[in-house]
Image (cartoon, rainbow, N blue to C red):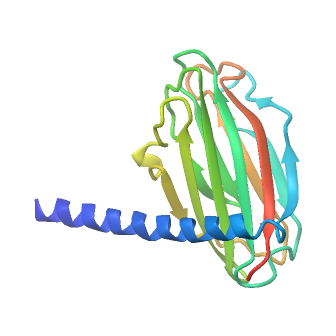
Amino acid sequence: TSTCASEQFKRREYMQRHRSLLIRWRRRLLTSEDDMVRLFENTATAGNTATTNEEDLHTFTVPAGRLVATGDAIFIRSWVFNAANANSKRTRVYFGSTLIGDSTALGSNNNWWAFEALIFRTGAATQKSVLTAHNIGNGSAWTTAAGGALNGTSPTETLSGTVAIRITGTSPISGAANDVQVYATTIDYLPAA
């Protein structure tokens, strides 16, 4: 029992640390909108095709050298709709080769997911990422297996080169088309303070 309690304490401490980081950056985003530069905006709905394979729905390539100074950040927002059926659906978010958010395969039925991700430079080939996601329809978060409502990762992309940001969708069991649809995505750059 003490091992279980210790693991729960560690998990809670980890989540609080990342939540605090996201709150600080979100405040900075709200007070620094003049400094933000829109890099990408896509309002064209893109849905998965009739396959069980993971597919890119919205993508953007961060130009080489965009994140030059430690503290430079990329802010991603996206809105995803799950079709009105009981099929299993999955949404994932990548920064380069690093998976920074994963809904896991869920039976979401006729509802919306919204997520925000913040990736900031900590070195020439190191970053920190925090992603929050929630279900707009029923107020739930991405599953515990996927990091819960808050998921922190540490990508190691070489920032002197380009870095792809990908939002993917799949209908992993039934392979039904348009089970996952990305309605809109924005990506902004925020220079270090």
In depth, the one of 173 and 14 nearer the eye is 14
In depth, the one of 138 and 131 nearer the eye is 138
In depth, the one of 151 and 175 nearer the eye is 151
**Residue 42 horizontal/vertical position (percent):** 85, 43
Residue 126, compared with residue 134, is above or below; it is below
Task: Name the residue at the top extreme.
Answer: 85
Q: Quadrant of the C terminus?
A: bottom right
Q: Who's the residue at 55% across and 66% down the image? A: 23
- Say whether residue 46 is left or right of residue 110: right
Residue 55, compared with residue 124, is above or below; it is above
Task: Name the residue at the front extreme.
Answer: 31
Q: Who's the residue at 75% across and 80% down the image? A: 192
- Say whether residue 142 is left or right of residue 191: left
**Residue 61 horizontal/vertical position (percent):** 85, 58
**Residue 148 horizontal/vertical position (percent):** 44, 49
Q: Who's the residue at 85% across and 67% down the image? A: 162
Residue 136 appears in which quarter of the rendering? top right
| Figure disc tally | 0
Q: Who's the residue at 72% across and 61% down the image? A: 75
Residue 165, compared with residue 63, is above or below; it is above
Q: Quadrant of the N terminus?
A: bottom left
Residue 74 appears in which quarter of the rendering? bottom right
